[in-house]
Image: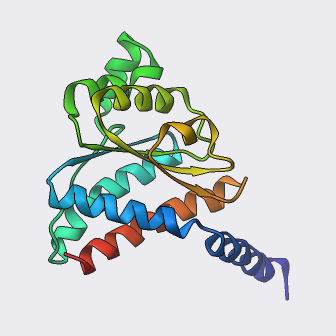
Amino acid sequence: MSDHSLFPRSYFSILAKVMDAMPLEHIGQFLKLMSQARDERKTVFLAGNGGSASTASHMANDLLKTIAKTGGKGIKALCLSDNIPVFTAIANDESYDRVFSSQLEVLAGPGDILLLISGSGNSKNLLEAATTAKKLGLKMIGFLGMNGGSLKPLVDISIIVPSDDYGPIEDMHMILNHLLTAYLRDHP
């Protein structure tokens, strides 16, 4: 077998090991909190940088539209990196560290949820968002990797992907999104 054929098997094997080591109790807490958010009509704010911003945007779509399309009740969801004019205005006028927290100060209220997505858990703008969210009375979930970084102690529920490799970390974050979507669809 060529390396081209063996590499996928190796990568899938790594993913399988990571999936087997995922913190199921924390994932269960996450599912429960998101079900409550749906039932109480709370807003879920999502934030991430780079690939994690893409995951956050995809997740906002799935929470808002995909669940409702399949017969469930959708969740009010907003990805804080999707409004590029607002994002760049805050980055320009305040600082890049405030691109998420400044939006939360205007949009969020007590009992809403902030889901922070980060491979390292050390992005300054996510740490600033967590500090702001705590002041505003939001519940926080971290989709993290590596050792959870500086975000781990700040969030209420941390789901840490046990890997130091961004590829499997980001893959698992997307799997968590689809797991939640399927759960909420099947548990109206």
In the rendered image, the residue lying farthest to the bottom is: 1
Indicate the quadrant where residue 7 lies. bottom right
Q: Nearer the viewer, residue 56 or 153?
A: 153
Q: Residue at x 73, y 53 (%)?
A: 164
Q: Residue at x 60, y 47 (%)?
A: 119
Q: Nearer the viewer, residue 39 or 14?
A: 39
Across and down, in percent, residue 135 comes to 33, 25
Does residue 130 appear anywhere in the picture?
A: yes
Q: Quadrant of the C terminus?
A: bottom left
Q: Is residue 182 above or below residue 36?
A: below
Q: Nearer the viewer, residue 143 or 80?
A: 143
Q: Residue at x 59, y 40 (%)?
A: 121
Q: Residue at x 85, y 89 (%)?
A: 1
Q: Along the horizontal axis of the image, is 35 left or right of 52?
A: left
Q: Is residue 166 above or below residue 20?
A: above
Across and down, in percent, residue 105 comes to 26, 24
Across and down, in percent, residue 160 comes to 59, 55
Q: Along the horizontal axis of the image, is 180 left or right of 150?
A: left
> How many numbered markers are drawn?
0
